[in-house]
Amino acid sequence: MRGTARGSLQPAALVMGPRPVAREPSDQIHSIAEVLAATFTSSAVRHILAEHSPDATGHCRGCRLPTTVAPVWPCRLWEIGKEMERLRAAGGRR
């Protein structure tokens, strides 16, 4: 629980608000995708997107390590891959 300015307690999730379902790529993700799109093949991008898919709990399969909890999907690598895919489609590159 977390205190507010009025002193009442609210769950942290309510204070922070709901997680957005779809979001625009950040400037950082877009910049990384621009650089990587020039060096990664289309099949490598498809592989990234396939590996970094959600599991039954909504976490990323590709980011799972034996000692850590995987991030909630979509992970940053999936977002970068998706942005690379979008950039290629917009530029007509294969």
Image (cartoon, rainbow, N blue to C red):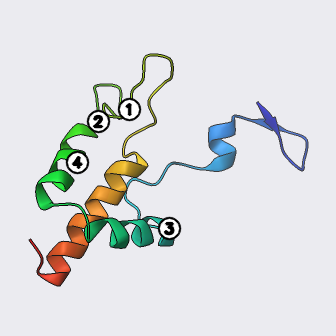
For the residue labelled by badge 3, is the local secondary structure a helix, a strand or a loop? Answer: helix
SS for callout 2: loop
Q: Is residue 86 above or below residue 43?
A: below
Q: CA distance from mark 3 to mark 1?
A: 22 Å
Q: Earlier in the sequence, mark 2 or mark 3?
A: 3
So how many labels did they put on this image? 4
Q: CA distance from mark 3 to mark 4?
A: 18 Å
Looking at the image, residue 70 lies above or below residue 92: above
- Who is closer to the viewer here, 40 or 11? 40
Q: Residues within 10 Å of mark 1 (few under 14, many from 20)?
A: some
- Say whether marks 1 and 2 touch (CB < 8 Å): yes
Examine the rendered structure and indicate whether residue 22 appears above or below residue 7: below
Query: Spatial distance from mark 1 to mark 2, Cα to Cα?
Result: 5 Å
Q: Amino acid at mark 3?
A: Gln
Q: Which residue is mark 2?
A: 54
Q: At x 53% / y 48%, what residue is drawn? A: 18
Residue extending farthest bottom: 91
**Badge number at residue 23:** none
Type of amino acid under label 4 = Leu
User: Which residue was labeled with disc 4?
Assistant: 49
The amino acid type of the residue labelled 2 equals Pro
Q: Earlier in the sequence, mark 1 or mark 4?
A: 4
What is the residue that sits farthest to the front in this orientation? 39
